[in-house]
Image (spheres, rainbow, N blue to C red):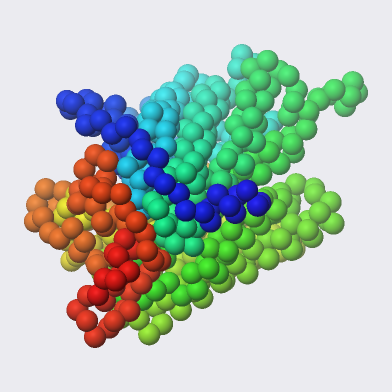
Amino acid sequence: MGALRAAFSRETEVHAVPVHEPRGLIGRYVFSTDHKVIGIQFFLLGLVMLGFGGLLALLMRYQLAWPFTKVPIVGEWLFPGTGGAMTPEIYTALFTLHGTVMVFFVVIPLLTGAFGNYLIPMMIGAPDMAFPRMNALAFWLLIPGVACLIMSMTTPGGGSGAGWTAYPPLTTVGDFAPGSLSGQSWWLMAVTFAGVSSLLGALNYVVTIVKMRAPGLTAMRLPLTVWGLCIAAILQLLALPVLTSGTALLAVDRIFDASLFTPGNASDGIGGQPLLWQHLFWFYSHPAVYVMVLPAMGMVSDILSVHSRKPVFGYRPMVFAMMAIAGLGFLVWGHHMFTSGMDPRLEMAFLASTMFIAVPSGVKTFNWLGTLWGARIRLTTANLFAIGFVAQFVIGGLSGLWLASTPIDSYMHDTYTVVAHFHYIVFGASLFALFGGLYHWWPKMTGRRMHEGLGRIHFVGTFVGTNAVFLMMHQLGLRGMIRRTADPLIQDAVAALQPLNVFITWSAVALVAVQGVFLLNLVYGLFLARRGEENPWRAATLEWESASPPPAGNFRRVLRVERGPYEYSVRPENEVDYLPQAAPMEAP
């Protein structure tokens, strides 16, 4: 700890990274080692996969609203030989693919890959990442991961159908055994590629932040966006090797019948432990929730401060709260296994640690409210999405407290309450921060602002649609609707609420449709909007010291940091009400 504290507290000199202006279209935009281009590549891939994952969700919602009826227009093409209707096996493969795509190929690549790559060097005053080629490799490893995911769908015999959690013994049937899940081995390869990509990126982020900060940029002068990305990267470094090792062992068990996770014959005493996989999987996958949420928390803190013209309330408690959330995130994985037959004494330990994680989460929530209290709030699209993030995070966090209680979880664990809780955090919170970040940093990336009118329509539609879809799922869960089932009508109590399932499906259609406004705004902000000021928000952090869009190498000079990142409303009587981090101390 002492060495880590020393690394973050001391001043650093920027380590020069050779900056070569790439030549040609391929060198500039495809095989570039410029962190900004790689960030945009992550963004484009994540956006395509987000659209793909959203279409999978609509297909599942159609099945739940009108079970086993022909899917209009695309049914015969997608489900040949079934009369254009979905089967339980197809539905299982769809929700497996949807969860895998959204977690491993959308939210993590967008928040940590796209924003991490684009913002970290610029927010710390560095010319590039510490390891530019490793940075490019981290992106390109996702491409074979996507290819393997596609193969998992197209392999004869059906796609992977064990859920995104891949529990044995469903996933340990040998590739050539009768009843094999033929797409499961491709699924394991896809997750492995995504895991190695994230691991390389996390290592690069930590080294860049520790070794390449501008002179004067000590730890307690870092923007909270950088803190969130750094802590998330440390989580990846500590937890991801466990999942990657587990997927390798699962592949060995599946292909070579090694009986690592597969229960054996009780008479011969030989066999593996299926619960071992659950421990390995959730030891990573619960911290992975914070890998998705912590960068979002940091981005939202920055956006609220800039667009409310007020310093972040309680900067140091915010930093320590993020550290506490990350640390406690390693102590709560067992709450995903309350119904697996866990010793009640161990359940109590996981229950207590899960409840306790609400304390630093509450600190952050009240700090965000404190930032807004008495501020000169500007209801820009970026700020609206940041405020929406706070609302979604609180709703998702409250339902998480229900599920942390062992007696309540015993009833709710396999119901749609879990689906609602998870989506409020991963979709409602993380993607609201993603949209807010895009609207906020778009002028930095392109030199143009997106249309505020279209942005507000996008926010209202997304906020209403998100709550119409996922808030109603709590009611279905309380009535006992089982998740991961293709036919809700088999439960009499749920069948009475079938109109609610139809309402949720139409709300999901509307939620996806309103994203067309966002795509229209992207086109407007890329081609039609006029070039504006280099710092239209009057933000104080270092990335705004560069031109918009930034050149290769980012900055024309080596920056010297003189103050913290949130010095707003320091002289409200002046037209300029902020002090940039790199402005000399004697600046008026």
Residue at point 89% right, 24% down?
269
Q: Residue 303's x, y, as percent?
A: 35, 65
Q: Is residue 277 left or right of residue 525?
A: right
Q: Is residue 497 left or right of residue 337?
A: left
Instruction: Indicate the quadrant containing the C terminus: top left, top right, bottom left or bottom right.
Output: bottom left
Count numbered badges in the picture. Answer: 0
Q: Is residue 318 visible?
A: yes
Q: Is residue 349 left or right of residue 301?
A: right
Residue at point 21% right, 55% down?
443
Please name whichever residue, 413 or 445, is drawn nearer the observer in this view of the structure: 445
Quarter of the figure with residue 310: bottom left
Q: Which residue lies furthest to the front in this view?
A: 586
Q: Is residue 232 above or below residue 270?
A: below
Q: In this view, does 260 lie to the left or right of 242?
A: right
Q: Can residue 99 be seen in this view?
A: no
Q: Is residue 390 above or below residue 270?
A: below
Quarter of the figure with residue 383: bottom left
Q: Is residue 173 above or below residue 170?
A: above
Q: Residue 25's x, y, as percent?
A: 17, 27
Q: Residue 396's x, y, as percent?
A: 53, 64
Residue at point 68% right, 54% down?
332
Residue at point 24% right, 39% down?
552
Q: Residue 136's x, y, as percent?
A: 37, 31
Please name whichever residue, 363 or 207, is drawn nearer the observer in this view of the structure: 207
